[in-house]
Image (cartoon, helix red, strand yellow):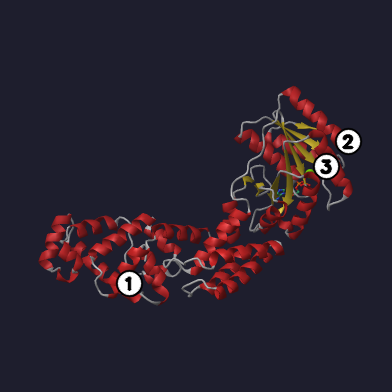
Amino acid sequence: NLTDKLDKAFHILKGHGKITDVNVADTLKEVRRALLDADVNFKIAKEFTNKVKEKAIGENVLTNLQPGQLMVKIVKDELTELMGGDVAGVNLSGNPSVILMSGLQGSGKTTFSGKLANFLKTKKNKNPLLVACDVYRPAAINQLHVVGEQIGVEVYSEPENKNPVEIAQNAIKHAKANGFNVVIVDTAGRLAVDEEMMNEIANVHKAIQPQETLFVVDAMTGQDAVNTAKAFNDRLNFDGVVLTKLDGDTRGGAAISIKSVVNKPIKFIGTGEKMEAIDVFYPSRMADRILGMGDVVSLVERAQEQYNEEEARKLQKKIAKNEFGFDDFLTQIQQIKKMGNMKDLVGMIPGANKALKDVEIEDDAFKHIEAIIHSMTPEERSKPAIIDGKRKTRIAKGSGTKVEQVNQLMKQFDQMSKMMKMMQGGAGKNLMRMMGGGM
Ligand code: GDP
Ligand code: MG
C-alpha cells in the first residue's frame, strides 16, 4: 500500500545528513510511484513531486530531524494543500436550501442523501425533505423511502410521474408550503457517463437552481473517478465532491486527483453503509490517512518547536569535552518535559525503546530529579565527580529525598552521559538529539 511505499521511499533518505539533489530525486521517484499506485493521476503525481522537490532542496535539514522525517512533513503539508487546505461547508443560505445530488449509478447518492439529511437534522438543527427523482426504477424510490423512515425524514415522491424536473419543482413547492428548510434531491445515475443522463441532470439543475450541487463518487473507482468528475463538472459546474466508500483501507488517492482536476472542494466522505457513516472532509486528516504516518508527523512538528540550534551546538561541544553537567541535564529534562509524555515520545522513535532499556523513564520521576539537582551547589552541578557520600547526604536532606534516590540519579546521569557520548555519531544520533530536546 501507499504507506509501505512511502516508508520505502523515505528509507532511501535515512542515513543522509542533508537533503541533496541526488537523494531527493531517488525518494521522489518512489513517492511518485506510491501516489500512482494509490490511483493519483499521473500528471498530478508529477506536479506534486516537483513541488515537493522545490521545497526539499535547499531546505536546511534541521539537525535534530532525519531528512526522511522532514520529507514526510513536506509531503504531508503539500498533500493537505493539494486537497484544499481548509474545510469547506455546504451552502445552506436558501429558503429552502436546495441540494442536488449527481453521480453515477452505485456511487452512493441515495445512501448519501439519507446521511446528509440525517446529519443536517441532528447536527445542524435543520428540517430536511428528501426527494426521489430517480424515476427509472421503482426500487430506487422505495430505497429512498426506506432510508427516510430509518432517519425519520419525510420523502417526497411521485411514483406515476416520469419527469424528474417536474418532481423536483413540485417537491420545492411542497417544502415551502410545509416548512422544510432543506431539500435534498436524489437523482438517477447510469453505470457510465452518457448524454441522456447528463441532459437530464442538467435540466433538473437548470430548473431548480440549487444552492449546492454535490458530485458523489465512489473512492474505490480510482482513475475512473477523475474522468467522471470532469464530465459532470463540465456540465453542472458542481460545488463540491462527496467521496464515498472510504471505509476499510481505501486510501483515497482519488481525493487528490479529483480536487486537482476539477478544482472543487471535497466536502464530505462516506465511511460505511450506515446512516451515521458520514464525515466532514478534513484535508489534513486525509493527508494523514494517505500517508498513514500521523505519529511521525506530529513528532517531527513537536521536535521542530523545541529546536534551538544555538543551544544544541553548545551542548554537543560540552559532551565532546566531557563537560556535560547536572545543569545541562536539568535543561534537557525541562526540554523533554515540554515535548510531552516521555513514554509516548520514546514510543514514536523507531528503535528507541531498545536503546533506552537501561534508562528508567518515568514522568513523575522528573519531580525528584529536579529537586535533587536544585539542592546541589553550582560546583557540584558542573563537576559531578566531587559528589561524595557526605555531599549526597546533604543533597538528599535538602531535596527531601533519600540518599538512594540521589545515588540512582547519579547512576542515571552517568548512563546518560555515556550514552550521549556513544551516540555522537551513527544511528543513535537522532535519538540523542531527541533526548537533548534540540541538538
Ligand atoms: P446510488 O446508485 O448512487 O444511489 O448508490 P446507493 O446509495 O444505492 O449505493 C450503492 C451501494 O453502495 C449500496 O449498497 C450502498 O449501501 C453502498 N454504499 C454507499 N455509500 C457507502 C459507503 O460510504 N461505504 C460503503 N461501504 N458502502 C456504501
Ligand atoms: Mg440511487
The span from disc 1 to disc 3 (Cα, nearest Å) is: 68 Å
Name the residue tied to disc 2: 163
Q: What residue is at 66 percent from the left and 63 percent from the top? A: 47
Name the residue tied to disc 3: 201
Q: Secondary structure at mark 1?
A: helix
Q: What residue is at 61 percent from the left and 59 percent from the top? A: 290
The kind of residue on which mark 3 rests is: Ile
The kind of residue on which mark 1 rests is: Met
Q: How many marks?
A: 3
426 horizontally vs 144: left or right: left
Examine the image and state in which quarter residue 352 appears: bottom left
Q: Which of the two residues, 418 or 108, is positioned nearer the viewer here? A: 418
Vertical position of residue 117 compared to residue 39: above or below? above
For the C terminus, which image quadrant? bottom left
Q: What residue is at 77 percent from the left and 52 percent from the top? A: 230
Q: Position of residue 164 (x, y in %)?
A: 85, 36
Residue 158 in sight in this render: no
Tell which circle, 2 or 3, labels the residue nearer the N-terminal end: 2
Name the residue tied to disc 1: 420
Q: What residue is at 40 percent from the left and 73 percent from the top? A: 428
Q: Secondary structure at mark 2?
A: loop
The kind of residue on which mark 2 rests is: Asn
